[in-house]
Image (tube, grey):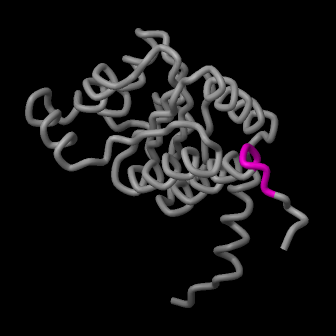
Amino acid sequence: MAFEFKNYFERFSEKLMEVDPENLMKAANLISKHGLLGGKLIFIGNGGSAAISSHLSVDFTKACKIRSINFNEADLLTCFSNDYGYSNWCKEALSAYADSSDIVILISSSGTSENILNAARFCVENDLKLITFSGFSPKNPLRSYGDLNFYVSSDLYNFVEMVHHTWLVAIVDLLSGVDLHGR
């Protein structure tokens, strides 16, 4: 079986371009507004989405000067999972760390992870601003919770995760004032 990189990158580019640029701008404006009001960003994901959460929480903090956190510390994750069950650890972490001025960003390739869905329900019940990133099925339940919902129409993990990552770093570059004409 021959792997065609050109075809792979063309298909990836198609998925990358599916986003509505107006929604990215809405997300950037919401994030900027909350950052100016003293709110922080809270990123949560599983697996590769957790890695994206780590990267973006650092980028938003450093490049955009917007306080950002993620819940990828082994001691927090294992403590909360042990005490509340894996399906509830994200919700309980939000209960402990989220303030009313924060924005929660939930990243889930499938949009069906129970711990992420419980966190989304917590956000809705507690009037926390919520931005979601998901993929796979257009009917995935995570898409129904966010104030803004971003979706990648693919069932390939790497496409979904890297498109989410690229959309988020594009917001970082916008808010940090990256000059696209610079070298």
The C terminus: image quadrant: bottom right
44 vs 155, left or right, is left
Q: Where residue 51 appears, x then y in whole percent?
A: 41, 56
In the image, residue 109 lies at what x, y percent? Answer: 46, 47
Instruction: Return the x and y of residue 105 as percentages of the image width and height.
Output: 50, 34
Measuring 39% from the left and 50% from the top, which residue is drawn there? Answer: 50
Please determine whether, in this image, residue 123 is positioned above or below residue 58. above
Residue pictured at 20% horizontal, 49% vertical: 74
Q: What residue is rendered at 49% in x and 16% in y?
A: 128
For residue 16, what is the image quadrant?
bottom right
- Residue name at image x 17 percent, y 33 percent: 80
Side of 163 where 17 appears, left or right:
right
* 11 magenta-colored: no
Question: Is residue 155 found left or right of 12 in the rendered image?
Answer: left
Q: Residue extending furthest left? A: 82
Question: How would you classify the magenta stretch by its main secondary structure?
Answer: helix
* Image quarter of residue 14: bottom right
As displayed, is residue 23 above or below residue 180?
above
Q: How many marks?
A: 0
Left or right: 146 in relation to 42 = right
Residue at the bottom extreme of this rendering: 2
The percent coordinates of residue 126 (x first, y second) are 42, 10
Query: Which region is colored magenta?
Result: 174-178
116, 135: nearer the viewer = 116
Quadrant of the rendered structure where residue 10 is? bottom right
- In this rendered view, identify the residue nearer to me: 126 or 148: 126
